[in-house]
């Protein structure tokens, strides 16, 4: 399920002079309209006019939040209300990059930091923005995002686009709620590579555990989650391989024309292999890497911490100054720092204080 990073913190955005007026206007209106339509989850569950499956999925949300809280996630403000969208996206995400390098277009705001994309509530506005970026010479894309987080600036509601069909509906909902709850807990300004990859890592590990504890190993829900994860990992690995091949190409001595020709061939192969409907480009491949490339680094830090809660607690102490640069893609050093903080905390703690 598609997600969007917290790029909609309106209290900060409205003080910025660097965004086009129509973006500010749609962001303010869209967020206010969404919150205005939200209904308390308990009220929705009790409403017989609401489809049974929606009510059953919503009934799981308090327990999912409690599960996340038991691992140190901040779930207090979010997911107490529900919005029926009537479409497949909460917002539309737009990103852009240089056509012959993996250099993302950045948008920076006071307080909330820098992002490699913007979220639009209006699909037509998102497509216009994408087209403007294409006309300016960027690789660009616009995609639907079924869930998003404001990073604690507003009480985020459950939205209907978070719901998946079939046996995977429950684990997918849990995964989204847990992922977005990580954003409300661990959020370093200017660091989308870290923020998104750590949310992906923690939410996936917690969902692996939650679905077994809630439904049992080998149940339809557990199998659906495992299959979806296996398929996703294989597809991501294939796309990451293309990213790396392109990165090598862009760093070579080939001419611009040669790079563009070879880039087209590599992406043609990727589209054919995965039967993709939307053709990838540098911007969409950067986004893929934002979410998925830090897994091995986070796993190493997790092992050093010994427990997922200790990993989360150490990660939430990070600040912008702990990173050597904005939009830092190299997460190995920060993983080492998380591990160091876990070890230091364990050494300073009284006996039995850090047992899982």
Image (cartoon, helix red, strand yellow):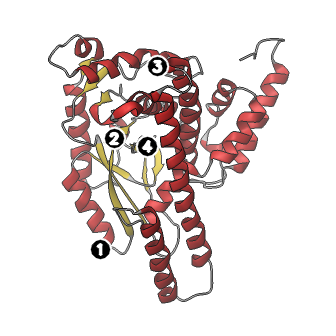
Q: Residue at x 30, y 36 (%)?
A: 161
Sort mark 3 into few (<14), some (14-19) or many (20+) by Cα contacts within 10 Å: many
Q: Sequence-wise, which precedes: disc 4 or disc 3?
A: 4
Sort mark 4 into few (<14), some (14-19) or many (20+) by Cα contacts within 10 Å: many
Q: Disc 3 versus disc 1: distance between alpha carbons?
A: 44 Å
| Percent of width and height locating residue 259 | 51, 83
**Up/down of 150 relative to 190, above or below:** above
| Quarter of the figure with residue 316 | top right
Mark 4, mark 3: which one is toward the viewer?
Answer: 3
Q: Which residue is mark 4?
A: 5
Observer able to see residue 192? no
Q: Report if the CB atoms under discs 1 and 2 are less than 8 Å apart.
A: no
Q: Nearer the viewer, residue 21 or 131?
A: 131
Q: Sequence-wise, which precedes: disc 1 or disc 4?
A: 4
Q: Sequence-wise, which precedes: disc 4 or disc 2?
A: 4
Q: Residue at x 49, y 15 (%)?
A: 66
Q: Disc 4 versus disc 2: distance between alpha carbons?
A: 12 Å
Q: Report if the CB atoms under discs 2 and 3 are less than 8 Å apart.
A: no
Q: Sequence-wise, which precedes: disc 2 or disc 3?
A: 3
Residue 319 badge: none
Element carrying mark 3: helix
């Amino acid at each position: 399920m598609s997600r969007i990073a917290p790029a909609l913190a309106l209290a900060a955005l409205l003080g910025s002079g660097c965004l086009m007026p129509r973006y500010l206007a749609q962001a303010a209106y869209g967020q206010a309209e969404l919150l205005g339509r939200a209904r308390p989850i308990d009220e929705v569950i009790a409403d017989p006019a609401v489809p049974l499956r929606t009510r059953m999925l919503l009934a799981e949300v308090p327990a999912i939040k409690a599960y996340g809280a038991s691992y140190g996630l901040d779930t207090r403000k979010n997911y107490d209300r529900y919005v029926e969208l009537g479409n497949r996206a909460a917002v539309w995400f737009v990103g852009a990059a240089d056509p012959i390098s993996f250099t993302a277009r950045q948008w920076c705001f006071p307080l909330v930091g820098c992002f490699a994309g913007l979220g639009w509530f209006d699909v037509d506005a998102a497509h216009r923005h994408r087209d403007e970026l294409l006309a300016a010479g960027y690789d660009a894309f616009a995609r639907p995002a079924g869930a998003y987080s404001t990073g604690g600036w507003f009480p985020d509601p459950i939205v209907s686009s978070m719901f998946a069909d079939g046996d995977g509906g429950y684990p997918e909902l849990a995964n989204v709620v847990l992922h977005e709850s990580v954003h409300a807990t661990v959020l370093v300004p200017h660091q989308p590579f870290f923020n998104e990859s750590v949310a992906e890592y923690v939410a996936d590990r917690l969902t692996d555990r939650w679905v077994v504890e809630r439904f049992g190993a080998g149940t339809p829900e557990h199998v659906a989650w495992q299959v979806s994860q296996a398929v996703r990992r294989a597809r991501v690995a294939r796309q990451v391989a293309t990213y790396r091949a392109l990165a090598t190409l862009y760093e070579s001595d080939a001419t611009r024309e040669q790079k563009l020709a070879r880039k087209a061939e590599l992406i043609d192969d990727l589209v054919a292999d995965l039967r993709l409907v939307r053709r990838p480009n540098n911007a969409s491949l950067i986004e893929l890497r934002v979410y998925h490339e830090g897994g091995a680094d986070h796993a190493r830090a997790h092992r050093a911490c010994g427990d997922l809660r200790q990993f989360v607690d150490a990660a939430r102490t990070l600040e912008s100054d702990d990173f050597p640069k904005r939009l830092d893609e190299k997460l190995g050093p920060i993983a080492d720092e998380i591990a160091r903080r876990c070890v230091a905390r364990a050494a300073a703690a009284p006996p039995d204080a850090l047992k899982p």
